[in-house]
Image (cartoon, rainbow, N blue to C red):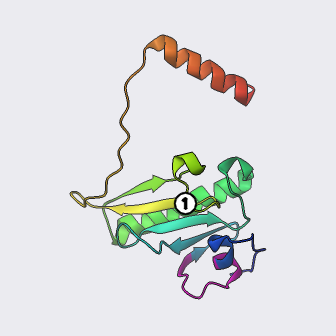
Amino acid sequence: MTPAPIAPACPFCETLAGTDADAVVVADAGDAVAVLDRCPVAPGHVLVIPRRHAASLEELTDVECGAVMSLARDVAGAVRAGLAPAVNLHLSDGHEAEQDVPHVHLHVIPRHEGDGVVIDLPGERPGRHEFERVADGLRAQMGC
């Protein structure tokens, strides 16, 4: 693993720099690295992190985003081949979204039927007018 600059008080940067003796690296794909989660919700719970420190998804380059997703796909395939029949991918971006470490990280969570892992996304379906209003606002922000 190639050392990376360490951001102050970032446990993932410490892992990437090789200064975290407890880290278990699963795979190193250059711009992204997969490590076992220290508090797994299931055996084989992996975090895929970009090598460069980025607190938010929008700070990543297209290449870094691609590297993270490509490595997550490979890890998910390995999980499905050897540990579990399914996976969840989960990324929280920002404090209000319960991002616990301010360095982008994508969880690859092995899943089994009845495993007790809960991902609750309740919501109410808005009307078409509300969908269009929200979509228009997003398009404007994206320059579409």
What quarter of the picture does the N terminus occupy? bottom right
| Relative side of 51 to 27, left or right | right
The answer to which of 117 and 108 lies nearer the viewer is: 117
Which range is magenta? 15-26
Residue 29 appears in the figure: no
Please give the count of numbered marks on the rendered protein: 1
Residue located 61% across and 59% down the image: 68
| Extreme residue in the right direction | 5
| Extreme residue in the bottom direction | 21
Please state which amino acid type lies under the numbered disc 1: Asp
Residue located 67% across and 84% down the image: 18
Residue 36 appears in the figure: yes
Residue located 46% across and 54% down the image: 89
Q: Tell me if residue 21 is in the magenta stretch.
A: yes
Badge 1: how crowded within 10 Å, few (<14), some, or many (20+)? few
Q: Where in the figure is residue 130, as x and y percent of width and height?
A: 50, 16
Q: Where in the figure is residue 6, as x and y percent of width and height?
A: 75, 74
Residue located 48% across and 71% down the image: 37
| Extreme residue in the top direction | 129
Relative height, residue 76 to residue 143 (above, below): below
Q: Tell me if residue 59 is in the magenta stretch.
A: no
| Relative side of 19 to 84, left or right | right
Q: Where in the figure is residue 58, as x and y percent of width and height?
A: 70, 47
| Relative side of 59 to 123, left or right | right
What quarter of the picture does the C terminus occupy? top right
The answer to which of 115 and 112 lies nearer the viewer is: 115
Q: Secondary structure at mark 1?
A: loop
Residue under circle 1? 100
Q: Where in the figure is residue 83, as x and y percent of width and height?
A: 33, 71
